Amino acid sequence: MAAAAECDVVMAATEPELLDDEEAKREAESFKEQGNAYYAKKDYNEAYNYYTKAIDKCPKNASYYGNRAATLMMLGRFREALGDAQQSVRLDDSFVRGHLREGKCHLSLGNAMAACRSFQRALELDHKNAQAQQEFKNANAVIEYEKIAETDFEKRDFRKVVFCMDRALEFAPACHRFKILKAECLAMLGRYPEAQSVASDILRMDSTNADALYVRGLCLYYEDCIEKAVQFFVQALRMAPDHEKACVACRNAKALKAKKEDGNKAFKEGNYKLAYELYTEALRIDPNNIKTNAKLYCNRGTVNSKLRKLDDAIEDCTNAVKLDDTYIKAYLRRAQCYMDTEQYEEAVRDYEKVYQTEKTKEHKQLLKNAQMELKKSKRKDYYKILGVDKNASEDEIKKAYRKRALMHHPDRHSGASAEVQKEEEKKFKEVGEAFTILSDPKKKTRYDSGQDLDEEGMNMGDFDANNIFKAFFGGPGGFSFEASGPGNFFFQFG
């Protein structure tokens, strides 16, 4: 009796299990079919839900995991899809589609070596599989792009690295590593908005990604927002304490900020020598920080202009605009130094650049002043010809004329060579021109303001210096040169 009871018990327990198992399979198949229908309609979220129900009913069916992996891939959830694909081939190692999906997930996530292994297994199972053959080629192409990018990054050929990463991302769209490398190179190329965009996209998906935090900080650092940059570097180091790049960048940022602030303080206190030394030290910290270094060069140029080292100031400002050709302050500083050194053509060029960029009244006036000085510089410098200052009095101008006219009078050089006589005659005429203009208040005002003297009806080409000389020293007989020996003369007045 005991044996019969035991058998009954066994039979009673087994029959419902078999019935339940068949029912579960039927339900799972129904869920799978519904999932397929939603997948065909591209309603991947609903497809995912029904494939999940099928898996819950039959957790050892490889195709259900494969289907859900395909759905997750369409949703861009490659890491989750990889788990399902791997489970599908664990359950059935001969499942070709499972190996293809595993490889595709590995490749999308940037693990090209693992992808190659998956595609190779698919080809072992079906050596004519065209998709496996193509995907295997794609994975090898990504491996090659990675190698080239690594070499070019060491060479600091950042444009080529960006190119390689763009090509690799066509096959590995979910690879954060490739995106970060591209973003870092974009930052090194000064393409900060693009770099920021890439880093921000990653941080939206993973707010703790230390590499993305580092790139965000790098962009701010290179845009001279050093204080904010330090905050991102610190946050990156909090997520990954051994992040070497973030550590170096954070150290450089803090050092730059400190040196620049110390230099500014010394400048404000009038300690120009110390300010120069501090700005110079700051420039040695990081040659890659273009915007900050442009400002440092301009600051040092300002210091040099205060020290009246105008050539050095011009050189510093030139270095600043080489680094940042949109840096208006550097152009203005250099233009002023050009004005101070009477390099008016260069000053006009810089002021034109400034006015084209910022059309303000102030910049227009600066340009106008430089153009006027350039125009004046192309005329004869009558003050220089007489050897007097621009603020010379009427008596000083007369005294200077008397001295220069006697010095260059043709009669005084009658015994000289024809070449010397010609040169002295030219100088004598110029002295007369200078006196005529500078001794007349109206003409002098027009000359000083850069206006054309011909508008006054005076054609300097027809000018007769002898008439001025006679009028100044008196009529005929009132003055003569007498020889007192070879090469010597004395003046005799009537």
Image (spheres, helix red, strand yellow):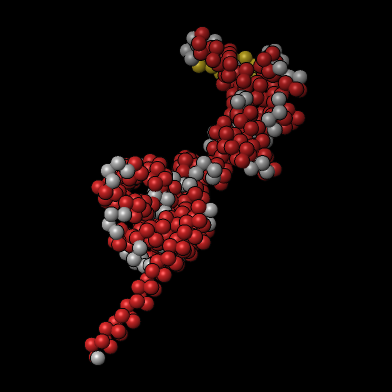
Left or right: 94 in relation to 326: left
Left or right: 20 in relation to 433: left
Whether residue 219 appears in this view of the structure is no
Where 417 falls versus 154 (above or below)?
A: above
Where 76 falls versus 208 (above or below)?
A: above
Q: Nearer the viewer, residue 63 or 167?
A: 63
Image quarter for residue 250? bottom left
Q: Nearer the viewer, residue 41 or 326?
A: 41
Q: Which residue is the extreme one toward the left?
A: 3
Assign the N terminus to one quadrant of the image.
bottom left
Q: Residue 220 appears at what percent x and percent y?
A: 48, 56
Q: Nearer the viewer, residue 137 or 300?
A: 137
Q: Residue 491 appears at what percent x and percent y?
A: 59, 19
Q: Nearer the viewer, residue 370 or 332?
A: 332
Where 262 falls versus 112 (above or below)?
A: below
Which residue: 35% across, 44% down? 131
Where 264 falls versus 455 (above or below)?
A: below
Report the number of discs. 0
Which residue: 50% across, 42% down? 321
Which residue: 34% across, 55% down? 98
Left or right: 412 in relation to 179: right
Whether residue 480 appears in this view of the structure is yes
Q: Which residue is the extreme one toward the bottom?
A: 1
Q: Residue 475 appears at what percent x and percent y?
A: 71, 15
Q: Residue 436 appears at what percent x and percent y?
A: 69, 23
Assign the C terminus to one quadrant of the image.
top right
Which residue: 26% across, 49% down? 125
